[in-house]
Image (spheres, grey):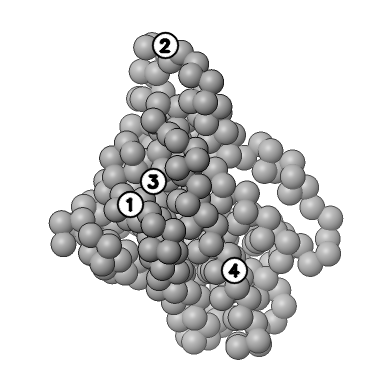
Protein backbone atom coordinates (compact mmCIF):
# COMPACT_ATOMS: atom_id res chain seq x y z
CA UNK A 1 0.00 0.00 0.00
CA UNK A 2 2.98 2.35 0.52
CA UNK A 3 3.44 2.84 -3.24
CA UNK A 4 -0.22 3.80 -3.60
CA UNK A 5 0.08 6.34 -0.79
CA UNK A 6 3.03 7.93 -2.55
CA UNK A 7 0.73 9.32 -5.25
CA UNK A 8 -1.77 10.76 -2.76
CA UNK A 9 -0.02 14.18 -2.62
CA UNK A 10 -0.22 14.40 -6.41
CA UNK A 11 -3.98 13.91 -6.48
CA UNK A 12 -4.37 16.31 -3.54
CA UNK A 13 -2.53 18.93 -5.60
CA UNK A 14 -4.92 18.27 -8.49
CA UNK A 15 -7.85 18.76 -6.12
CA UNK A 16 -6.25 21.95 -4.79
CA UNK A 17 -5.87 23.23 -8.35
CA UNK A 18 -9.58 22.60 -8.96
CA UNK A 19 -10.40 24.47 -5.75
CA UNK A 20 -8.19 27.43 -6.67
CA UNK A 21 -9.73 27.66 -10.13
CA UNK A 22 -13.23 27.86 -8.67
CA UNK A 23 -12.79 29.74 -5.40
CA UNK A 24 -9.75 31.98 -5.80
CA UNK A 25 -9.51 34.98 -8.09
CA UNK A 26 -7.45 33.31 -10.80
CA UNK A 27 -9.14 33.51 -14.18
CA UNK A 28 -8.91 31.27 -17.21
CA UNK A 29 -6.18 33.45 -18.70
CA UNK A 30 -3.98 32.89 -15.63
CA UNK A 31 -4.34 29.10 -15.81
CA UNK A 32 -3.75 29.11 -19.56
CA UNK A 33 -0.47 30.94 -18.92
CA UNK A 34 0.53 28.45 -16.22
CA UNK A 35 -0.11 25.52 -18.52
CA UNK A 36 1.87 27.10 -21.34
CA UNK A 37 4.78 27.80 -18.98
CA UNK A 38 4.79 24.20 -17.76
CA UNK A 39 4.40 22.70 -21.24
CA UNK A 40 6.91 24.85 -23.11
CA UNK A 41 9.55 25.52 -20.42
CA UNK A 42 9.36 23.58 -17.17
CA UNK A 43 8.56 20.06 -18.35
CA UNK A 44 11.10 20.20 -21.20
CA UNK A 45 13.73 21.13 -18.60
CA UNK A 46 12.71 18.17 -16.43
CA UNK A 47 12.74 15.70 -19.34
CA UNK A 48 16.08 16.95 -20.64
CA UNK A 49 17.68 16.68 -17.21
CA UNK A 50 16.35 13.17 -16.64
CA UNK A 51 17.64 11.84 -19.98
CA UNK A 52 20.90 13.79 -20.19
CA UNK A 53 22.17 12.53 -16.84
CA UNK A 54 20.71 9.01 -16.68
CA UNK A 55 22.92 5.93 -17.13
CA UNK A 56 20.85 4.66 -20.08
CA UNK A 57 21.54 1.54 -22.08
CA UNK A 58 19.56 1.88 -25.28
CA UNK A 59 19.76 -1.82 -26.18
CA UNK A 60 18.57 -2.82 -22.72
CA UNK A 61 15.72 -0.29 -22.98
CA UNK A 62 14.19 -1.84 -26.11
CA UNK A 63 11.87 -4.28 -24.26
CA UNK A 64 10.64 -1.39 -22.11
CA UNK A 65 9.91 0.79 -25.14
CA UNK A 66 8.30 -2.17 -26.92
CA UNK A 67 5.98 -2.57 -23.92
CA UNK A 68 4.94 1.08 -24.18
CA UNK A 69 4.28 0.84 -27.91
CA UNK A 70 2.32 -2.41 -27.45
CA UNK A 71 -0.07 -1.16 -24.78
CA UNK A 72 -0.57 2.11 -26.68
CA UNK A 73 -1.51 0.31 -29.90
CA UNK A 74 -3.79 -1.94 -27.84
CA UNK A 75 -5.52 1.16 -26.49
CA UNK A 76 -5.99 2.44 -30.04
CA UNK A 77 -7.57 -0.85 -31.11
CA UNK A 78 -9.97 -0.86 -28.17
CA UNK A 79 -10.84 2.80 -28.80
CA UNK A 80 -11.63 1.97 -32.42
CA UNK A 81 -14.13 -0.63 -31.18
CA UNK A 82 -16.10 2.19 -29.58
CA UNK A 83 -17.61 3.16 -32.91
CA UNK A 84 -19.22 -0.18 -33.91
CA UNK A 85 -20.24 -0.81 -30.30
CA UNK A 86 -21.85 2.57 -29.60
CA UNK A 87 -22.56 3.95 -33.10
CA UNK A 88 -21.61 7.53 -32.30
CA UNK A 89 -21.76 10.37 -34.83
CA UNK A 90 -18.52 10.43 -36.79
CA UNK A 91 -17.26 13.70 -35.32
CA UNK A 92 -18.03 12.62 -31.74
CA UNK A 93 -16.24 9.32 -32.24
CA UNK A 94 -13.22 11.09 -33.77
CA UNK A 95 -13.00 13.34 -30.70
CA UNK A 96 -13.44 10.50 -28.20
CA UNK A 97 -11.12 8.05 -29.99
CA UNK A 98 -7.96 9.62 -28.56
CA UNK A 99 -9.24 9.31 -24.98
CA UNK A 100 -8.45 5.59 -24.87
CA UNK A 101 -4.68 5.93 -25.31
CA UNK A 102 -3.44 9.50 -24.82
CA UNK A 103 -1.76 10.03 -21.46
CA UNK A 104 -1.52 12.92 -19.02
CA UNK A 105 2.19 13.67 -19.03
CA UNK A 106 1.99 15.81 -15.88
CA UNK A 107 0.58 12.99 -13.76
CA UNK A 108 2.80 10.36 -15.39
CA UNK A 109 5.99 12.26 -14.57
CA UNK A 110 4.89 12.94 -11.00
CA UNK A 111 4.10 9.27 -10.41
CA UNK A 112 7.25 7.95 -12.11
CA UNK A 113 9.44 10.20 -9.97
CA UNK A 114 7.76 9.02 -6.79
CA UNK A 115 7.87 5.29 -7.53
CA UNK A 116 11.22 5.13 -9.34
CA UNK A 117 13.23 8.23 -8.44
CA UNK A 118 15.64 9.53 -11.08
CA UNK A 119 15.75 6.12 -12.74
CA UNK A 120 11.97 6.12 -13.04
CA UNK A 121 12.01 9.63 -14.54
CA UNK A 122 14.64 8.63 -17.08
CA UNK A 123 12.64 5.58 -18.12
CA UNK A 124 9.45 7.58 -18.45
CA UNK A 125 11.21 10.32 -20.42
CA UNK A 126 12.42 7.69 -22.88
CA UNK A 127 8.86 6.42 -23.25
CA UNK A 128 7.49 9.93 -23.73
CA UNK A 129 9.95 10.57 -26.55
CA UNK A 130 8.60 7.51 -28.39
CA UNK A 131 4.90 7.69 -27.55
CA UNK A 132 4.18 11.41 -27.96
CA UNK A 133 4.63 11.24 -31.77
CA UNK A 134 2.76 7.93 -31.95
CA UNK A 135 -0.36 9.08 -30.08
CA UNK A 136 -0.47 12.42 -31.86
CA UNK A 137 -0.26 10.80 -35.30
CA UNK A 138 -3.13 8.44 -34.43
CA UNK A 139 -5.32 11.14 -32.89
CA UNK A 140 -4.83 13.60 -35.74
CA UNK A 141 -5.29 10.92 -38.41
CA UNK A 142 -8.77 10.08 -37.09
CA UNK A 143 -9.73 13.71 -36.44
CA UNK A 144 -8.51 14.87 -39.86
CA UNK A 145 -10.78 12.54 -41.83
CA UNK A 146 -9.00 13.30 -45.10
CA UNK A 147 -8.19 16.95 -44.44
CA UNK A 148 -4.69 18.29 -44.97
CA UNK A 149 -2.71 18.73 -41.76
CA UNK A 150 0.71 19.92 -40.72
CA UNK A 151 1.33 17.05 -38.30
CA UNK A 152 5.00 16.62 -39.19
CA UNK A 153 5.71 20.27 -38.56
CA UNK A 154 3.83 20.21 -35.26
CA UNK A 155 5.71 17.14 -34.03
CA UNK A 156 9.04 18.64 -35.11
CA UNK A 157 8.47 21.61 -32.82
CA UNK A 158 6.74 19.80 -29.95
CA UNK A 159 8.68 20.89 -26.84
CA UNK A 160 8.42 17.49 -25.13
CA UNK A 161 9.70 15.62 -28.18
CA UNK A 162 12.51 18.15 -28.67
CA UNK A 163 13.53 17.97 -25.01
CA UNK A 164 13.62 14.16 -25.08
CA UNK A 165 15.64 14.14 -28.31
CA UNK A 166 18.10 16.69 -26.91
CA UNK A 167 18.50 14.77 -23.66
CA UNK A 168 19.10 11.48 -25.46
CA UNK A 169 21.64 13.09 -27.80
CA UNK A 170 23.43 14.79 -24.90
CA UNK A 171 23.64 11.48 -23.08
CA UNK A 172 24.76 9.46 -26.10
CA UNK A 173 27.51 11.98 -26.98
CA UNK A 174 28.63 12.28 -23.34
CA UNK A 175 28.61 16.07 -23.63
CA UNK A 176 29.66 18.12 -20.58
CA UNK A 177 27.03 19.41 -18.17
CA UNK A 178 28.23 22.78 -16.82
CA UNK A 179 27.35 23.19 -13.15
CA UNK A 180 25.73 26.62 -13.52
CA UNK A 181 23.60 25.64 -16.51
CA UNK A 182 22.48 22.39 -14.91
CA UNK A 183 21.59 24.22 -11.69
CA UNK A 184 19.25 26.47 -13.68
CA UNK A 185 17.75 23.41 -15.38
CA UNK A 186 17.30 21.79 -11.94
CA UNK A 187 15.42 24.82 -10.62
CA UNK A 188 13.14 24.90 -13.65
CA UNK A 189 12.51 21.17 -13.37
CA UNK A 190 11.65 21.46 -9.66
CA UNK A 191 8.77 23.83 -10.49
CA UNK A 192 7.32 21.58 -13.21
CA UNK A 193 5.43 19.00 -11.15
CA UNK A 194 3.57 21.19 -8.62
CA UNK A 195 2.52 23.73 -11.24
CA UNK A 196 1.62 21.01 -13.74
CA UNK A 197 -0.61 19.17 -11.27
CA UNK A 198 -2.32 22.39 -10.19
CA UNK A 199 -3.03 23.11 -13.86
CA UNK A 200 -4.56 19.64 -14.29
CA UNK A 201 -6.97 20.34 -11.44
CA UNK A 202 -7.84 23.78 -12.77
CA UNK A 203 -8.71 22.24 -16.12
CA UNK A 204 -11.24 19.73 -14.80
CA UNK A 205 -14.66 20.34 -16.33
CA UNK A 206 -17.54 17.94 -15.72
CA UNK A 207 -19.82 19.66 -18.21
CA UNK A 208 -23.29 18.72 -19.27
CA UNK A 209 -23.15 16.86 -22.56
CA UNK A 210 -25.26 14.24 -24.27
CA UNK A 211 -22.56 11.55 -24.15
CA UNK A 212 -24.29 8.38 -22.89
CA UNK A 213 -23.11 6.90 -19.61
CA UNK A 214 -22.19 3.63 -21.34
CA UNK A 215 -19.84 5.55 -23.65
CA UNK A 216 -18.18 7.32 -20.72
CA UNK A 217 -17.79 3.96 -18.97
CA UNK A 218 -16.34 2.38 -22.13
CA UNK A 219 -13.58 4.89 -22.73
CA UNK A 220 -12.66 5.27 -19.08
CA UNK A 221 -12.62 1.49 -18.78
CA UNK A 222 -10.30 1.23 -21.78
CA UNK A 223 -7.90 3.90 -20.49
CA UNK A 224 -7.88 3.10 -16.78
CA UNK A 225 -8.39 -0.68 -16.74
CA UNK A 226 -7.74 -2.40 -20.07
CA UNK A 227 -4.61 -0.46 -21.13
CA UNK A 228 -2.84 -0.92 -17.75
CA UNK A 229 -3.73 -4.62 -17.87
CA UNK A 230 -2.11 -4.82 -21.32
CA UNK A 231 0.94 -3.01 -19.95
CA UNK A 232 1.30 -5.51 -17.12
CA UNK A 233 0.88 -8.44 -19.51
CA UNK A 234 3.49 -7.05 -21.92
CA UNK A 235 5.88 -6.29 -19.06
CA UNK A 236 5.71 -9.94 -18.01
CA UNK A 237 6.11 -11.18 -21.59
CA UNK A 238 9.12 -8.93 -22.26
CA UNK A 239 10.76 -9.71 -18.91
CA UNK A 240 10.91 -6.14 -17.53
CA UNK A 241 12.50 -5.62 -14.13
CA UNK A 242 10.36 -4.36 -11.20
CA UNK A 243 11.09 -0.64 -11.71
CA UNK A 244 10.42 -0.84 -15.45
CA UNK A 245 7.20 -2.73 -14.80
CA UNK A 246 5.95 -0.18 -12.28
CA UNK A 247 6.77 2.75 -14.56
CA UNK A 248 5.17 1.09 -17.61
CA UNK A 249 1.97 0.24 -15.73
CA UNK A 250 1.81 3.70 -14.15
CA UNK A 251 2.23 5.31 -17.57
CA UNK A 252 -0.59 3.16 -18.95
CA UNK A 253 -2.86 3.85 -15.95
CA UNK A 254 -2.78 7.66 -15.91
CA UNK A 255 -5.86 9.44 -17.26
CA UNK A 256 -6.21 11.08 -20.66
CA UNK A 257 -4.24 14.23 -21.42
CA UNK A 258 -6.03 17.56 -21.18
CA UNK A 259 -4.49 18.44 -24.53
CA UNK A 260 -6.95 15.99 -26.12
CA UNK A 261 -9.66 18.61 -25.61
CA UNK A 262 -7.56 21.33 -27.23
CA UNK A 263 -6.75 19.13 -30.22
CA UNK A 264 -10.38 18.16 -30.76
CA UNK A 265 -11.58 21.76 -30.73
CA UNK A 266 -8.74 22.97 -32.95
CA UNK A 267 -9.66 20.35 -35.55
CA UNK A 268 -13.37 21.18 -35.57
CA UNK A 269 -14.62 18.25 -33.47
CA UNK A 270 -16.97 18.68 -30.47
CA UNK A 271 -15.05 19.44 -27.28
CA UNK A 272 -17.69 18.78 -24.61
CA UNK A 273 -17.55 14.95 -24.85
CA UNK A 274 -13.76 15.03 -24.57
CA UNK A 275 -13.91 17.37 -21.56
CA UNK A 276 -16.32 14.96 -19.89
CA UNK A 277 -14.07 11.94 -20.53
CA UNK A 278 -10.94 13.77 -19.33
CA UNK A 279 -12.57 15.03 -16.14
CA UNK A 280 -14.36 11.82 -15.17
CA UNK A 281 -11.25 9.81 -16.02
CA UNK A 282 -8.99 12.01 -13.89
CA UNK A 283 -11.36 11.69 -10.94
CA UNK A 284 -11.63 7.92 -11.38
CA UNK A 285 -7.85 7.57 -11.70
CA UNK A 286 -7.50 8.79 -8.11
CA UNK A 287 -8.85 5.32 -7.23
CA UNK A 288 -7.66 3.10 -10.08
CA UNK A 289 -4.05 4.31 -10.32
CA UNK A 290 -3.18 3.55 -6.67
CA UNK A 291 -4.79 0.12 -7.08
CA UNK A 292 -2.56 -0.66 -10.07
CA UNK A 293 0.49 0.44 -8.10
CA UNK A 294 -0.49 -1.91 -5.29
CA UNK A 295 -0.90 -4.74 -7.80
CA UNK A 296 2.61 -4.33 -9.25
CA UNK A 297 4.33 -3.53 -5.94
Residue situated in front as seen by the camera: 128 or 12: 128
Taking 48 as reference, is 265 left or right? right
Is residue 272 among what the camera can see?
no
Q: Residues within 10 Å of mark 3 (few under 14, many from 20)?
A: many
**CA–CA distance in space, label 4 to label 3:** 22 Å
Query: Quarter of the image holding residue 78?
Result: bottom right
Answer with left or right where residue 58 lies relative to residue 4. Answer: right
Q: Give the mark toward the camera: 1 or 2.
A: 1
First in sequence: mark 4 or mark 3? Answer: 4
Say which residue appears at 52% left-offset and 82% top-offset. Answer: 215
Q: 10 Å neighbourhood of mark 1: few (<14), some, or many (≥20)?
A: few
Can see residue 138?
yes
Given contact means CB atoms under 8 Å apart, are the residues at marks 1 and 4 in contact? no
Q: Quadrant of the C terminus?
A: bottom left
The numbered mark at residue 109 is 3
How far across and how far down the image is residue 141, in percent? Answer: 73, 61
229, above or below 24, in the image: below
Helix, strand or loop at mark 4:
helix
Secondary structure under tag 2 reads: loop
Mark 1 sits on what residue?
A: 241
Mark 1 to mark 4 CA distance (whole Å): 26 Å
| Of labels 4 and 3, the one closer to you | 4
Q: Position of residue 195 (x, y in %)?
A: 37, 41
Q: Is residue 112 left or right of residue 269?
A: left
| Disc on the earlier residue, 1 or 2 | 2
Expressed as whole percent of the image width and height from the top left, the position of residue 53 reads 40, 26
Earlier residue among tags 1 and 4: 4
The residues tagged by marks 1 and 3 sit, at their Cα atoms, a distance apart of 19 Å
Amino acid sequence: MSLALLVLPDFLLIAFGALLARRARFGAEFWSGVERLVYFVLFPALLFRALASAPLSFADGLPFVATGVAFTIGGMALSALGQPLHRLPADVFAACFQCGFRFNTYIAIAVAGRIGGEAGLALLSLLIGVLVPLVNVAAVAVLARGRATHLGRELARNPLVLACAAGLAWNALALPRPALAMRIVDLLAAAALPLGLLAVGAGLRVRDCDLPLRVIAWWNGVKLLAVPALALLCARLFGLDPVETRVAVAMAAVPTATSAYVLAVQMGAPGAPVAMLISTGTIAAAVTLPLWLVLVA
